[in-house]
Amino acid sequence: MSNALKTTWADKSLRTSALAIFFFGTTGAATSPYQSLIGIQELGLSDSGYAALMFAAAIINVSASVMMGILADRMGDYRTSILYVSLFGVLGFGIVYAFANVPAFVVSKLLLLPIFGALNSLIFANVRANSARLSSSQLIGVNSTIRATISLSWVLMPGVVGVMLAGASSMLPAYLIATLAAIICFILGAFFLPPAPKIEIEGGEARSRFLASLGEVLDPRVAMRVLAIALICSMLHINDAVRPLIVTGKAGGTVADLGIIVGIVAALEIVFILFWGKAETWMKPVRALALGAGLYALYLVLQGLATERWHVYAQTVISGIAAAAIISLPITYLQDLISDRPGLGSSLIAVNIFLSAGLSAAIFAIGTRIGDYSFASILGAIVGSFGIILLFVLESGKTRKTS
């Protein structure tokens, strides 16, 4: 763990990337808990209108991440892309705070912030491009360390923003905080982030064309593995949907209990993200991911069976340990699927987020249609287990071909 931290902190590019992704995480941590309140209650969007806006924004975000990854690979310069995308964040958060009306909110969520969302993938692409000298285990540790900084922002910022805006008549100042965080992302990229070494793409100009690059994402070898990871990661999203309802419902807890539980799990994630990065140095990455995913499936089953408040508190340890694996380990795995294209390979992170969120929505709808929230939690575990099986099948097939 300490080696990964030292490696990240000693390198100017990696250190700056970690700081940039912390402030990127800050923009989401400051606004996401309150955006539905702002959009619906303060600005007057309907429930259906808000849902449609969020769905469209998710599609644009994943499309923008893939396109920006392709463009950055083609330019061979991730720093320039990071600068431009950061400005989309400054403008996107800024106009919501400045104008405080539905048109500004819609333009921000539909056009500006989905492009800013590509910053996550671009920062990891820059890390990948600057890590050519590192061994595979060192790269895994660095990715885990940088991913942990996002969790740190989510541990710190929701509480900070909540305290700052306690008793306020509007939650819109959260968007001012996000604007300032996006400005810091731009400043870090402009004045502190060294340009990454230029990456030469095998196959030359033909592979740098947009359609050829897109074809690599859709290639069955890549697409099926992304699907397996998305099935696994869907467990995180289904948990986000059902945990509040189970805690405050069947388990007999309160909103205060929910906040404490979320905080405990987020703090544990930071510690265990670093642990899983270290574990991959003595355990095959796929096995480490499968172990973490298996633990998370077990947690979802236990959550579905919870009937007392102490049950959900007791489950926080296994939840934190397992969530840390699913949050961090797929990053390097997805990048390795298109290893010579840092931008395109890192854009698979956004593709995975989109697919896993869509799968979780379907799981929630089916689960609550057939049973209750507890059943939806258990169904999420079953779907995630299919992802583990699919991943093992795909990787064992690759091993047989190699041997």
Image (spheres, helix red, strand yellow):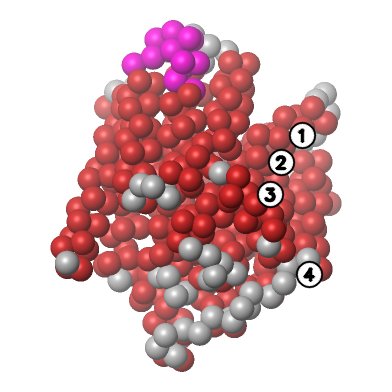
Q: Quadrant of residue 29?
A: top right
Q: How many marks overall?
A: 4
Callout 1 environment at 10 Å: few (<14), some (14 to 19), or many (20+)? Answer: some
In the rendered image, which quarter is residue 79 located in? bottom right
- At a point 46% along the width and 32% down the height, the residue shown is 321
What stretch of residues is rendered in magenta? 305-316
- Give the spatial CA distance, label 2 vs label 3: 12 Å
Nearest the viewer among 170 and 28 is: 28
Q: Between marks 2 and 1, how big is the CA–CA gap?
A: 6 Å
Q: CA distance from mark 3 to mark 4?
A: 16 Å
Foreground label between 2 and 3: 3
190 on left or right of 330? right
Q: Tell which circle, 3 or 4, labels the residue nearer the N-terminal end.
A: 3
Left or right: where does residue 349 sit relative to residue 46? left
**Which mark sits nearer the N-terminus, 2 or 3?**
3
Q: Which residue is mark 1?
A: 161
Q: Which residue is mark 2?
A: 30
Which mark sits nearer the N-terminus, 2 or 1? 2
